[in-house]
Amino acid sequence: MAFDGHNIWVANSGSNNVTKLSSSGATLGTFPAGSGPFELAFDGANIWVVNNGSSSVTKLRATDGAVLGTFSVGRGPLGVAFDGANIWVVNETNNTVSKL
């Protein structure tokens, strides 16, 4: 899960999408991601979705869930963090870290 300052985002690994929930728990939308979305991060404007099954990260605009891009990373991505400037992804299968 991730918090964007207003809403909660939840990765739905079995459905290959993410759901945006209001603070009251109401569903605001469900948006596509790659295969096996696992972990999420918020960078101040966008939600970054780690797709464990497709070795990629999907960038969604937080305001409307629009897909802004999908980026390849190492195999078996499991974790994601935003450091204020970059997105960092931990790739379990390769024992590497990707910087986007």
Image (cartoon, rainbow, N blue to C red):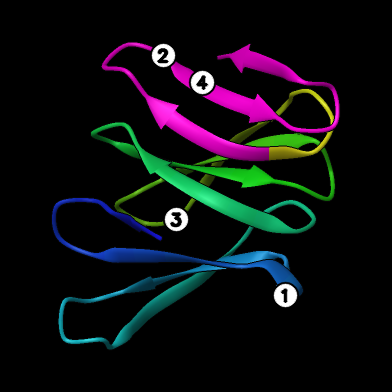
Mark 3 or mark 1: name the one nearer the start of the chain: 1
Local packing at callout 3 (Cα closer than 10 Å; few below 14, some 14-19, many 20+) is some
**What type is the residue that disc 3 sits on?**
Gly
Q: Does the magenta portion include 81?
A: yes
Discs 2/3, front? 2
Local packing at callout 4 (Cα closer than 10 Å; few below 14, some 14-19, many 20+) is some
Discs 4/3, front? 4
C-beta proximity under 8 Å, tags 4 and 2 = yes
- Residue at (84%, 44%) from the top-left corner? 54
Q: Could you tell me which quadrant the C terminus lies in? A: top right
What residue is shown with label 2?
86
Which of the numbered marks, if any, corresponds to residue 65?
Answer: 3
> Callout 4: helix, strand or loop?
strand
> Callout 3: helix, strand or loop?
loop
> Callout 1: helix, strand or loop?
helix
Q: Could you tell me which quadrant the N terminus lies in? A: bottom left
On screen, residue 54 versus residue 15, left or right, reads right
Q: Main secondary structure of the magenta part?
A: strand
Magenta residues span 78-100
Q: Is residue 32 above or below residue 71?
A: below
The answer for how far apart the CA atoms under marks 4 and 3 are is 21 Å
Query: Which quadrant of the structure image shows residue 78?
Result: top right
Which of the numbered marks, if any, corresponds to residue 15?
Answer: 1
**What type is the residue that disc 2 sits on?**
Asn
What residue is shown with label 4?
88
Mark 2 or mark 3: name the one nearer the start of the chain: 3
- Residue at (32%, 18%) from the top-left corner? 83
